[in-house]
Amino acid sequence: MSSGLMSFIWEGLANTLLLTVFGALLGLVFAFIAGLGRSSERKWVRGIAMVYTEVFRGFPSLVLLFVLIFIIPTFGFQLNPLIAGILALALNIGAYAAEVVRGAVKAVPPGQLEAAIALNFTPVQRLRKVILPQAVVAMIPPFTNNLIELLKATSLVSLVYISDFTFAAQLIRASTGETALVFFGLLVGYGIIALVFTTAMKLLERMAARSLGRTVPSGLFGRKEVAA
Amino acid sequence: MDWDWGYAVDSLPLLAEGMLVTLELTLAGSLLAYLLGLVFAVIRQLRIPGLSQIVFLIVEFIRSTPLLIQVFAFFYLLQPAIGVKLSPFLTGVIALGVHYATYTSEVYRAGIDAVPKGQWEAATALSLPRGRVWTGIILPQAVPRVLPALGNYTISMFKETPLLLAIGVVDVLNRAKEAGAETFRVIEPYTLAGVFFLLVSYPASILVRKLERRVGTV
């Protein structure tokens, strides 16, 4: 394969990683806002958070991409396609991850919160010093699943003409006719990226657990099963 | 650009055809995923040397790679290689079914693992034939508990069907695209397609949650 074609692949690969990493970071922000919002004392905050999670969990990411890429320009301004892609993916994965945040916060034993209140911690202190350090450890394994789902969903952006890994590979297939090589390369490529992400998350999980004085069973590979 | 009710109503019949296709894809794909997932789960549980490991690797590989690429590979690579030509719809059903079977197999596995060990031991003590142990004892206890999780994957699948427009399946999103290309009005068809997904998946998820409360989760 000529180096010109290879540069397409590298650019596509870079865009796929960009979409995944920034989609995950922005999704994390949405997830924490919505997830913590759902356990707020104020009813309207809970309401907004619930509408966000329900709507974006019920909405296919591809439809969301179509809306951001094809409808928004009809209102007169154009989002950078890559940013639109990140936003669509983050809105979607954030809604799923919000449920993870909510579940993990709910799973912290109530005695912890009561103790923090007894010690006269402010609400922010309770959250920052008592609830979150424990909840975050429980969030990491399901977040790993969310991250892999996000990585897989990034391939959808190729359908709205964003030049990600899939798009670049399709271009190469069109120009060289190397169907077998291209699809095999794509599958293996995504498989390897997924493996790298799961391994990194596994390390993160161990670090987080160790900071709480817990240990995680060994075995670096393989995803932990978390109920959907 | 303003919302045009007349155009929205006019495009409904065309979209409705697509909605039907989307629902058919989901139904057929789910059925395949439920059956194939059970087969995967039982094969892994039987611990047949070689076969169980191969199934494990296949399941992990399919779960880690995008459905879109699997659809492409199945349509443009595998089918010509083995000399068959399936319709885009059938290709979509099989791809969805196999992809989600890897998820449902994990669900079944959790359900099978949740059956108390004493049940297996009792079956052995009664020297029941292996087939009877599965069909008469293990699965009747394992399957009801996993129904909510299976339902959740059907909802996920429903929301992933639009990507099949890439191989020419004429689902609701593809119909919306068609309508938009014809009239250069995209707001109405895409919004209606989105609303359709919400109107189906939200009640469905409430139903699944109700079921969850009744049978519990694994």
Image: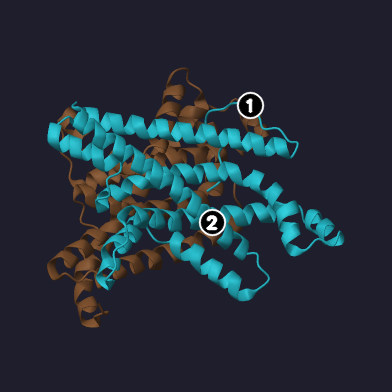
Q: Position of residue A140 (x, y in %)?
A: 59, 43
- Identify the residue shown where x is 49% and y is 66%: A52
Relative placement, left or right, of A23 versus B195 is right
Q: Residue at x 51, y 35 (%)?
A: A198
Q: Quadrant of residue B138?
A: top right
Q: How is the image coloured?
A: by chain
Q: Could you confirm whether marks 2 and 1 are on the same chain?
A: yes
For chain B, give the colour.
brown
Q: Quadrant of residue A56?
A: bottom left
Q: Are there few (<14), some (14-19), or many (20+) residues within 10 Å of tag 2?
A: some
The chain carrying label 1 is A
- Quadrant the N terminus of chain B occupies: bottom left
| Residue B172: quarter of image | bottom left
Label 1: which secondary element? loop
Give the residue at mark 1. A218
On-image quarter of the C terminus of chain B? top right
On screen, residue B41 versus residue A214, left or right, reads: left
Image-based side of B170 in relation to B123, left or right: left
**Disc 2 to disc 1, C-alpha distance:** 30 Å
Above or below, B125 against A19 in this view is above
Q: Nearer the viewer, residue B11 or A82?
A: A82
Is tag 2's residue or tag 1's residue first in the polypeptide sequence? 2
Picture disc at residue A5: none
Residue carrying label 2? A29
Report in which chain the residue with disc 2 lies. A
- Nearer to us of marks 2 and 1 is 2
Name the kind of residue labelled 1 in the image: Ser
Which chain is depicted cyan?
A
* Residue B72, visible in the rendered structure: no
